Image: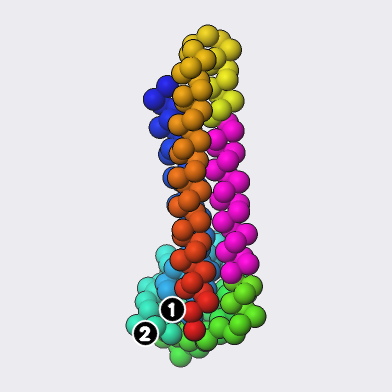
Amino acid sequence: MASVFDDCKQEMEQTVGAFKRELTRLRTSRASTALLDGIVVEYYGARTPLNQLSSITAPESRLLVIQPFDRSAIGEIERAIFQSDLGLTPVNDGKIIRIPIPQLNEERRKLLVKNAHKHAEEGRVAIRNVRRDVNDHLKKLLKSHEVSEDDEKQAMAEVQKMTDQHIEQINETLKKKETEIMAV
């Protein structure tokens, strides 16, 4: 029974972690190197993550600097950033790429918040799916007489408690991100 709870908790924590990583990719008015995590560059015929081709830093709150390990990749890196849906304009000086982070307008902020809510709902659904799978497993254990009815009810209550805790983590994280996005 303990392994069922451990697996459930682990899957729910992974879901919350994936949600948090997804939110770091949402753009705010501040420069964050995590903003470029999802960018993949075509490099010598292979699709390579940007952070494996270059050093990415945020020397100021409104500027990202990309220093490629191989200068010949600058054009491809720049192209990949333009093609991303981040709405950023890289400036290439031949050695490094600077990306100024412009102030977000109200319409863009609302769109980002809406996107964050969509990711939060996906996370909540994933957690509920884990709960459903665990409850189904517990019902099978009851049916095969491996656990008693009382144990099954107690286990389902514990799974519901875990579900509520992880959904609350998602809600709190969403609220923080929403505040961060809407800040002027």
> Which circle's residue, 1 or 2, is located before the other in the chain?
1
At mark 1, the secondary structure is loop
Name, please, the residue furthest toward the top.
145
The image position of residue 160, as x and y in percent, is 51, 36
* x 52%, y 86%: residue: 103
Residue type at mark 1: give it.
Answer: Ala
Name, please, the residue furthest toward the bottom.
93
Is residue 123 magenta-colored? yes
Residues in magenta, as a range: 113-133
Q: Is residue 89 left or right of residue 155?
A: right
The label on residue 60 is 2
* x 47%, y 46%: residue: 166
The image position of residue 71, as x and y in percent, is 43, 79
Residue type at mark 2: give it.
Answer: Glu
Q: Is residue 131 left or right of residue 13?
A: right
What secondary structure prevails in the magenta region? helix
* x 37%, y 73%: residue: 55
Closest to the observer: 18 or 169?
A: 169
Closest to the observer: 157 or 91?
A: 157
Q: Is residue 120 above or below residue 127?
A: below
The image position of residue 140, as x and y in percent, is 58, 18
- Callout 1–callout 2 Cβ contact below 8 Å: yes
| Neighbour tally class for label 2: few under 14, some 14-19, many 20 plus, Cα within 10 Å | few
Q: Quadrant of the N terminus?
A: top left
Q: Is residue 49 above or below residue 89?
A: above
For label 1, the residue is: 31
Is residue 121 magenta-colored? yes
| Neighbour tally class for label 1: few under 14, some 14-19, many 20 plus, Cα within 10 Å | many
Q: Residue 139 appears in which quarter of the rendering?
A: top right
The label on residue 3 is none
Q: Is residue 128 left or right of residue 59?
A: right
